[in-house]
Amino acid sequence: MENLVFSINATLPVFLVMAIGWGLRRLGFLPPAFCTAADKLVFKVTLPVMLLCDMASVDLVHDFDGKYVAFCFGVTILSILVIWALAHRFLRDKSLVGEFVQACYRSSAAILGVAFIQNIYGNAGSAPLMILGSVPLFNIFAVTILTVENPTRQGTLRPGAVLKGVVTNPILIGIAAGAVLSLLPFELPTLVSKTFDSLASLTSPLALLSIGASFEGARAVRKIVPTLLASVCKVGILCAVFLPLAVRLGFRDEQLIALLIMLGSPTTPTSYIMAKNMGHEGVLSASVTVVTTLLSALTLTLWIFLLRSGGYIA
């Protein structure tokens, strides 16, 4: 029951902020111009700063666990490539491939990971290493896939264009800058770090309000099948496939909880932001974010119960 309450407290506020955004749009407080401006601000400023702060907080020298990071890295790459191939093979509406793939794999790892482990174990545990092994890949592949699968693109896509999109993407620049900062023998001045923290804290509220304000039920219903497929993959299938493998390889306790967040936490709201800013409709991304947020309170609790029942987490 304690885990259920925590899961609800961690995920339900996310849904409620989206619902508030929807209500404020209907009351006239959040016009379309707000959503456009908020999406651009999050994509180009606050989200890169948030990821910079997350990466800078990882102690790559003292806390590094090569086996664990390699597992996160390998699982992330494998799951993305398999989902991408299957989406191309079976998804009827090919204009949805980019959003579908991103929604299936891109977790709220950086947002929920530390909070979950701290609640259970009292410290961040393996969350920073999980973030190191997955979040950069989440974003690199998101940029690549959304570029390659852009439904508004005209003409043949050249590899140079994809590479340029990756190198100049604000989110990846933030991750790279954070990785460099984590290796430096000193910390940023308090004035700078607090300014960055303030900007980073705007990311989730702005993204969630924009998702809610932009949400259109009629258009979402027309995409109900890919929405449900992506949601089941996100909160169920990935965990069912890779958590038993993690157990077999000897990962336990906070390592497993961090992997659970990487694999089974709800689709991150920033997937919608990236889709909208890279030429995609965004309806599927928003819908999967809403559905997985609602489902994850129950599914995360179920996975924790199963892992505890098996004696794999304390």
Image (cartoon, rainbow, N blue to C red):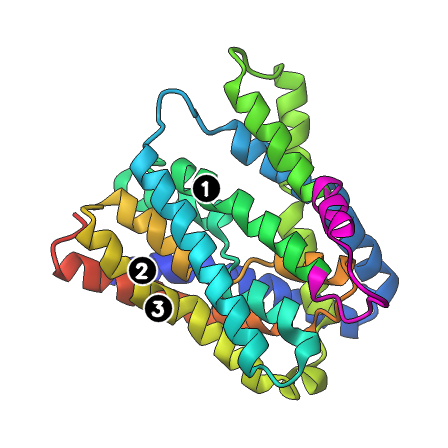
The residue to which callout 1 is attached is 131
Q: Who comes first in sequence, dot 1 or dot 3?
A: 1
Q: Position of residue 211 (x, y in %)?
A: 68, 65
Any part of residue 35 in sight: yes
Q: Nearer the viewer, residue 5 or 246?
A: 246
Rendered residue at 77%/55% (across/down): 158
Q: Are marks 3 and 2 in contact (CB under 8 Å)?
A: no
Which quadrant of the view contains residue 150? bottom right
The magenta region covers: 148-169
Q: Is residue 69 left or right of residue 291?
A: left
In this picture, is 155 found above or below 198? Answer: below
Q: Residue at x 36, y 20 (%)?
A: 62
Give the SS element for disc 1: helix
Residue 301: x %, y % from top left: 30, 63
**Mark 1 closeness class: few <14, some 14–19, many ≥20 residues within 10 Å:** many
Which quarter of the picture shows residue 308?
bottom left
Residue placed at 64% from the left, 60% from the top?
145
Give amino acid for label 1. Answer: Ile
Where is mark 3, residue-wise? 299
Q: Is residue 108 magenta?
A: no
Q: Is residue 189 above or below residue 86?
A: above
- Mark 3 or mark 2, which has the lower sequence index? 2
Q: Nearest to the eye among marks 1 and 3: give it.
A: 1
**Could you say which disc has been placed on residue 242 in the image?**
2
Return the mark for residue 95: none
Q: CA distance from mark 2 to mark 1?
A: 17 Å
Asked whether residue 285 appears in the rendered view, the answer is no
